[in-house]
Amino acid sequence: MDQIRIAGGRALKGEISIYGAKNAALPLMAASLLTSETLTLSNLPHLADISTLAHLLAGLGVEIGMNGDADNGGNAGRVLSLRAETISETTAPYDLVRRMRASMLVLGPLLARAGAATVSLPGGCAIGTRPIDIHLAGLERLGATIELRHGYVNAAAPRGLTGGEFRLPVPSVGATENLLMAASMAKGETVLSNAAREPEVADLANCLCAMGAEIEGIGSDELRVRGVAGLHGTDHEVLPDRIETGTYALAAAMTGGEIELVGARAELLSSPLEAFAETGMHIGETARGLVVRGDGRARSIDVQTQPYPGFPTDLQAQMMALMAVSDGASMITETIFENRFMHVPELVRMGADITVRGGTALVRGVAKLKGAPVMATDLRASVSLVLAGLVAEGETVVSRVYHLDRGYERLEQKLAACGAQIERVEP
Ligand code: EPZ
């Protein structure tokens, strides 16, 4: 398994292109099941998760074509055309779903289009048990019958789905997306309250409307959907990845460098950018996106993760890396997932001073981290170790970087192009 080796101490300077968000692309790809026409998605990132979902969708009967002119810079292969002329299979198998829980997002569209879906229970993952009870309760509210058998969800709606009112107990991103896609072709009106407001949900809703769906309240926590008989194809550009944007902004700040994030949209991550500015990071908008500069040690601040528009849980581990070398003490509270501090013991091995009590980590900034061999455990924890390695004294080797490849495209190449001493090695 590949490793990433970093020699810390270089200030990063240059520019990094930000492409489409993984967490927008995945539900958008699942939406292709809702129509027999072609859905063309552009600005896609090159990520393992995208390939895994494409493989799963192909197994359900979706014809997939990857194109995108090879000559316009890094844009080769960023355009995906998906066409589910017919649904030939309604089962999403365990060996694919266990690898990527976002496979669960085929449940709603399969039910809406084919009236049946058998999807393996995703199982937990490193950051938590990740239940799907809200997905299932919402689909039952729309008239589906749900049975759990041999580790699979067997859902059926032979006479189609019927709109209804459903309040999500937790503003679940995935459940909101599954229910939105299911409701788009249910008979009558559906009202989803306490819905997730993440920009990726809005991006999906906007694409569904372009496909002929009738959705009101996009961006709010109450989505009103009037079901239509069928949806048609469309072309849709995937919105830029706000988590990748925040990650590279932190890399610039931590190393005392300056990076232009080309393609980034500040309005998608206003809450983290406000927090970053409080630490002393300089952030400016440019014609092409954002420019971020760090100078001197970051000021310590307290952070609490919240559903959008609060501070995103997907940037918590990366923020902790910055706070580990800040000028004071910072309380970081994780409220979304029950076990999202796996980066802590690895950062401590690099000399960080962090104490965890329940869902809160007390981070006392240290003058210097020391390079060390560390282990990636989940996608965002992995990248926080890379950030720490960029500023640590000496060499850091991050193992199990397949976690990184799920959510960050060519991370080491992008950082190396900005002056980092970083390379991928095969042990
Ligand atoms: C999405 O996961 C993202 N993944 C996650 O990003 C992100 O961390 C998360 O939203 C929160 O923003 C994708 O979009 C593919 P949730 P999702 O349902 O939809 C509980 C990354 O690093 N819950 O909003 O699975 C759940 O346990 C990944 O890119 C239920 O209790 O997250 C959690 O505590 C990690 N029952 C909370 O809700 C349910 O039926 C939020 O989960 C569903 C969720």
Image: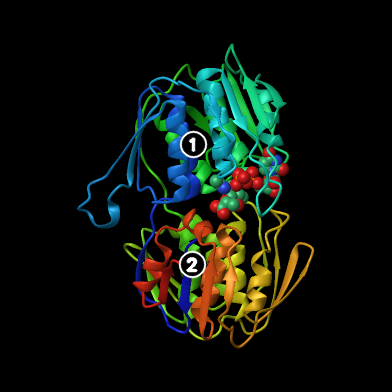
Name, please, the residue furthest toward the front: 427
Name, please, the residue furthest toward the left: 71
Residue topped by disc 2: 3
Residue under the image location 59 percent in, 11 percent down: 159
Dot 1 beta carbon under 8 Å from ligand 1: no
Give the x, y percent position of residue 346. Answer: 64, 71
Can residue 285 be seen here? The reply is no
Can residue 309 be seen here? The reply is yes
Task: Report the front residue among 385 and 319.
Answer: 385
| Left or right: residue 36 compared with residue 30 | left
Residue under the image location 56 percent in, 45 percent down: 99
**Image vertical order of residue 27 relative to residue 116, above or below:** below
Q: Separation of disc 1 and disc 2 at Cα?
A: 38 Å
Which sits earlier in the primary sequence, circle 1 or circle 2?
A: 2
Residue topped by disc 1: 205
Is disc 1 surrounded by few (<14), some (14 to 19) or many (20+) residues within 10 Å?
Answer: many
Give the x, y percent position of residue 44. Answer: 38, 47
Give the x, y percent position of residue 32. Answer: 43, 30
Name, please, the residue furthest toward the top: 159
